[in-house]
Image (cartoon, helix red, strand yellow):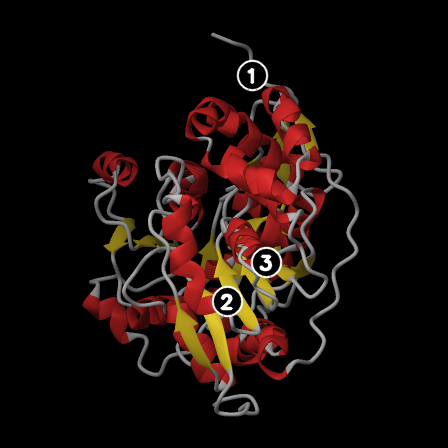
């Protein structure tokens, strides 16, 4: 139901993360807040990776024209910082809400933040899904608010009547069920997760390990499936419909993730699991730590290698111990209590109110005061970033079209991402020696 519908004439501009024919997020905003949205797609986009360069300045300027007369615009992705600068350079006088969804991924994202600083407005807000990620964006000068306005779909992700039928549909045997849902890319540390699952099967012979992923043609996933082709206790569910995923959350005994990814800032999958009443286990890392901080949630230690070029990883033994504790608990938390706590925290019908100021002109949420984060910027970037900082707004914006320079400076993206990942670990995380070179 809409949360106090605004006047019928209210229109909010919207630039989605990717150039698609349909933006679900703009539809959610419209449905939940009763506002009309005017969507503009920008293609190609820096949001979609370094191989995508910006459209010409004139083309980008023309694409933004329908938004200039509006009082507020939502801009998705790290490139939203750049889109805000482009709008303001053309005379846009409204406020913007920027939803990066991911942590800065390299040179282009850092440059976008530096350019935005020349065009920032006190009414702007950057919504980031966790305090550690917000500290990263704050270090780049962004006016951050800790929050995920779109939360999770609270109409879908709740205990599902008849969910047990999913066992028969997927030919899952009776017994305990350990579930992972998400991307299968290397940054999700699927190998470590499956090692924990196989060890847990030794402790609980009736345990089934289910990996549900929407990516079905992925080299990393294909290799894992081949190795485990003859392991009867591990099942891969490819591209599950959302209702089937909600049913899996409902019947699972524990949701587990090992990810220490540097990308997503909000632990969406464990939040969905908790909303279905399923206990969840994962690393004490970035947004996962905050999502798991409730009844039914367990966050485990993260190891940070001493070598600065290595990313953090979850303590595998601690992860297995946490899974054991959940599966063997004599008095587990009541699933209804897990579900109600998650609903209060993550339900979209509640979290969407963080964007209410775009519709009714109320004050935006306060900017979050955060402790500084030690973000290591590659030495090769520093002179150029200093030049952008000292430039006029127009000169700073024009630097975004220096294609040759971007290609050169992007060579240090990987080391920057590792620095971001290390900064997302809690203070006091265990530092372990790096293994000797072979």
Residue 382 vs 123, above or below: the answer is above
The image position of residue 438, as x and y in percent, is 47, 7
The image position of residue 261, as x and y in percent, is 50, 42
Does dot 1 land on a helix, a strand or a loop?
loop
Q: Which mark is residue 155?
A: none
The image position of residue 103, as x and y in percent, is 55, 46
Q: Quadrant of residue 48?
A: top left
Q: Which mark is residue 68?
A: 2
Nearer the viewer's eye, disc 2 or disc 3?
2
In the image, what residue occupies the spot 66% across and 47% down? 118
Q: Residues within 10 Å of mark 1 (few under 14, many from 20)?
A: few
Residue 292 visible, this orientation = no
Residue 322 vs 168, above or below: the answer is above
**Residue beneath disc 1:** 435
In the image, what residue occupies the spot 69% across and 72% down? 364
Q: Residues within 10 Å of mark 2 (few under 14, many from 20)?
A: some
**Residue beneath disc 3:** 129
In the image, what residue occupies the spot 61% across and 26% down? 384
Q: Residues within 10 Å of mark 3 (few under 14, many from 20)?
A: many
Q: Earlier in the sequence, mark 2 or mark 3?
A: 2
């Amino acid at each position: 139901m809409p949360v106090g519908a605004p006047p019928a004439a209210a229109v909010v501009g919207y630039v989605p993360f990717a150039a698609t024919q349909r933006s679900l997020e703009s539809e959610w905003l419209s449905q939940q807040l009763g506002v009309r949205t005017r969507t503009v797609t920008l293609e190609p986009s820096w949001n979609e990776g370094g191989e995508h360069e910006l459209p010409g300045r004139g083309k980008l300027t023309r694409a933004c024209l329908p938004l200039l007369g509006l009082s507020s615009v939502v801009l998705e992705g790290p490139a939203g910082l750049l889109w805000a600068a482009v709008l303001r350079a053309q005379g846009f006088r409204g406020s913007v809400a920027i939803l990066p969804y991911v942590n800065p991924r390299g040179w282009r994202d850092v440059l976008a933040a530096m350019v935005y600083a020349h065009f920032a407005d006190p009414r702007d807000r950057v919504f980031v899904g966790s305090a550690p990620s917000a500290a990263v964006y704050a270090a780049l000068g962004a006016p951050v608010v800790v929050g995920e306005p779109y939360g999770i779909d609270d109409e879908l992700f709740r205990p599902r009547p008849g969910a047990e039928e999913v066992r028969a549909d997927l030919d899952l045997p009776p017994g305990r069920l350990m579930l992972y849902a998400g991307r299968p890319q290397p940054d999700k540390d699927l190998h470590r997760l499956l090692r924990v699952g196989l060890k847990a099967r030794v402790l609980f012979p009736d345990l089934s390990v289910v990996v549900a992923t929407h990516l079905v043609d992925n080299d990393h996933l294909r290799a894992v499936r081949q190795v485990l082709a003859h392991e009867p206790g591990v099942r891969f569910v490819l591209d599950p419909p959302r209702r089937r995923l909600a049913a899996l959350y409902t019947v699972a005994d524990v949701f587990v993730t090992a990810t220490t990814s540097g990308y997503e800032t909000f632990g969406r999958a464990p939040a969905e699991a908790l909303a279905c009443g399923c206990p969840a286990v994962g690393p004490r890392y970035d947004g996962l730590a905050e999502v798991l901080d409730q009844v039914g949630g367990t966050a485990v230690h993260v190891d940070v290698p001493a070598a600065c070029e290595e990313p953090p990883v979850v303590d595998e033994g601690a992860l297995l111990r946490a899974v054991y504790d959940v599966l063997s608990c004599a008095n587990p938390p009541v699933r209804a209590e897990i579900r109600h706590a998650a609903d209060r925290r993550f339900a979209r019908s509640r979290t969407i109110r963080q964007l209410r100021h775009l519709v009714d002109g109320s004050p935006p949420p306060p900017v979050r005061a955060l402790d500084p984060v030690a973000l290591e910027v590659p030495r090769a970037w520093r002179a150029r970033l200093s030049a952008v900082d000292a430039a006029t707004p127009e000169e700073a914006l024009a630097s975004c079209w220096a294609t040759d320079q971007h290609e050169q400076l992007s060579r240090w993206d990987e080391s920057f991402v590792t620095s971001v990942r290390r900064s997302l670990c809690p203070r006091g995380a265990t530092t372990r020696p790096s293994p000797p070179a072979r």
